[in-house]
Image (tube, rainbow, N blue to C red):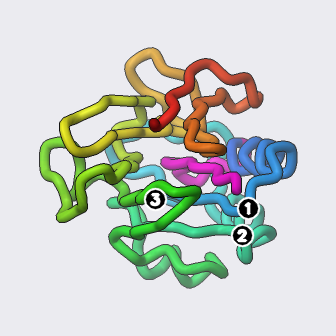
């Protein structure tokens, strides 16, 4: 089983297209989106080719393969143009023997833990920086932002396969991995 994880697209038609290219290349079972799909937010610069409707159209083309949670920039109006649910604050998944707590990060994160069992992998977007930190009782991961990376990071996404998380840039080149034992 293979899961692709991405966050913080922020309405970029360009990066929605790149994400779909990677999706078709990676051939995952599902794409898990950690929020902030269409709107760029007032604190972010406009991403390349900012076009919410074109980004929505690209994502809708694989609607049956997407799992998504709500980001702080996502709202009911976004749900009107997206053909898959995006308004859940979190998703709890069992994937390949791992328990994944997926949320955007603006509420539940390393500083404010959600109620979760020991051994859970906490997945957040929101901060636009790829992260992997082991804590007592849980693993924290952030795929980074596909379209507006911060702190000298590059646009990126995660792939989970055989208990290994691999960070890849938006051209599909792997640059970091972490295996959960």
Q: Residue at x 31, y 50 (%)?
A: 119
Q: Secondary structure at mark 1?
A: loop
Residue, disc 3:
35
Viewer-nearest of discs 2 and 3: 2
Q: CA distance from mark 2 to mark 3?
A: 16 Å
Residue, disc 1:
29
Magenta span of residues? 1-14
Q: CA distance from mark 1 to mark 3?
A: 19 Å
Measured as percent of width and height from the top left, residue 78 is found at: 51, 74
Q: Look at the numbered discs 2 and 3 and tell me whether their residues touch, using CB distance below 8 Å.
A: no
Q: Look at the numbered discs 1 and 2 and tell me whether their residues touch, using CB distance below 8 Å.
A: yes
Residue, disc 2:
65
* The quarter of the displayed image where residue 108 is located: bottom left
Residue 123 vertical position relative to residue 70 in the rendered view, above or below: above
Residue 126 vertical position relative to residue 115 in the rendered view, above or below: above
Viewer-nearest of discs 1 and 2: 1
Q: Which mark sits nearer the N-terminus, 1 or 3?
A: 1
Left/right placement of residue 96 relative to residue 107 reads: right
Residue 93 vertical position relative to residue 146 in the rendered view, above or below: below
Residue 79 visible: yes
Q: Secondary structure at mark 3?
A: loop
Q: Which mark sits nearer the N-terminus, 1 or 2?
A: 1
Q: Residue at x 47, y 55 (%)?
A: 98
Measured as percent of width and height from the top left, residue 30 is found at: 68, 62
Q: Residue at x 40, y 39 (%)?
A: 141
Measured as percent of width and height from the top left, residue 52 is found at: 62, 61
Measured as percent of width and height from the top left, residue 23 is found at: 77, 50
Q: Residue at x 20, y 60 (%)?
A: 114
């Amino acid at each position: 089983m293979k899961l692709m994880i991405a966050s913080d697209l922020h309405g970029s038609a360009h990066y929605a297209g790149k994400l779909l290219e990677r999706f078709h290349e990676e051939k995952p079972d599902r794409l898990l989106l950690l929020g902030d799909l269409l709107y760029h937010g007032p604190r972010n610069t406009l991403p390349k080719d900012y076009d919410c409707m074109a980004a929505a159209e690209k994502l809708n083309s694989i609607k049956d393969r997407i799992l998504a949670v709500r980001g702080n920039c996502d709202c009911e109006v976004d749900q009107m143009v997206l053909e898959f649910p995006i308004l859940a604050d979190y998703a709890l998944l069992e994937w390949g023997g791992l328990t994944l707590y997926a949320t955007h990060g603006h509420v539940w994160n390393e500083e404010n833990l959600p109620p979760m069992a020991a051994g859970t992998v906490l997945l957040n977007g929101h901060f636009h920086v790829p992260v992997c930190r082991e804590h007592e009782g849980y693993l924290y991961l952030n795929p980074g932002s596909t379209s507006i990376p911060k702190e000298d990071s590059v646009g990126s996404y995660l792939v989970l396969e055989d208990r290994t998380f691999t960070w890849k840039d938006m051209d599909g080149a792997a640059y970091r991995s972490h295996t959960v034992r």
